[in-house]
């Protein structure tokens, strides 16, 4: 026996399942989004670093230790 489902009903079921998953796994979803945002920020920082001049070890640690 084969069940035939129209595209509209299938979309609705998929949306409901996705919404339920996001509700139940909100922390996991949040963590994944935050990790993705951190990755984007890191890649942008690396790109900026390639465009800027070289820094000494002391300059880097001064920045990291908020002494700049």
Image: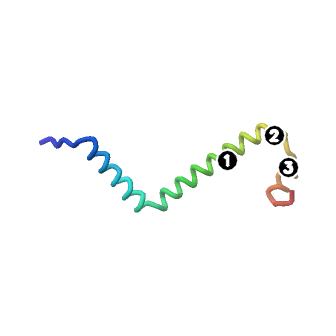
Query: Marks 2/3: CA distance?
Result: 15 Å
- Is 61 situated left or right of 22 in this image? right
Task: Tell me which label, 2 or 1, sits earlier in the chain.
Answer: 1
Query: Marks 2/1: CA distance?
Result: 15 Å
Nearest to the observer: residue 11 or residue 34: 11
Extreme-left residue of the structure: 1
Q: Which mark is residue 3?
A: none
Helix, strand or loop under label 2: loop
Helix, strand or loop under label 1: helix
Query: Marks 3/1: CA distance?
Result: 20 Å
Q: Residue at x 82, y 60 (%)?
A: 66
The quarter of the picture where the N terminus appears is top left
Task: Tell me which label, 3 or 1, sits earlier in the chain.
Answer: 1
Pinpoint residue 14: horizontal percent, then vertical percent: 33, 49
Task: Tell me which label, 2 or 3, sits earlier in the chain.
Answer: 2
Residue receiving disc 1: 42
Query: Alpha-carbon neighbours of circle 2 within 10 Å: few (<14), some, or many (≥20)?
Result: few
Image quadrant assignment for residue 52:
top right
Residue receiving disc 3: 57
Nearest to the observer: residue 44 or residue 61: 44
Q: Residue at x 48, y 56 (%)?
A: 29
In this picture the colour scheme is rainbow
Pinpoint residue 18: horizontal percent, then vertical percent: 38, 53
Residue receiving disc 2: 52
- Is 23 situated left or right of 8 in this image? right
Query: Alpha-carbon neighbours of circle 1 within 10 Å: few (<14), some, or many (≥20)?
Result: few
- Is 26 situated left or right of 35 in this image? left
Image quadrant assignment for residue 34:
bottom right
Q: Residue at x 57, y 49 (%)?
A: 36
Pinpoint residue 64: horizontal percent, then vertical percent: 79, 57
Pinpoint residue 68: horizontal percent, then vertical percent: 86, 56
Extreme-front residue of the structure: 8
């Amino acid at each position: 026996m084969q069940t035939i489902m129209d595209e509209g009903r299938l979309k609705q079921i998929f949306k409901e399942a996705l919404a339920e998953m996001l509700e139940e796994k909100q922390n996991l979803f949040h963590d994944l989004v935050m990790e993705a945002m951190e990755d984007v920020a890191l890649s942008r920082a690396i790109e900026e670093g390639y465009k800027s001049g070289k820094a000494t070890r002391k300059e880097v640690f001064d920045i990291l230790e908020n002494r700049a």
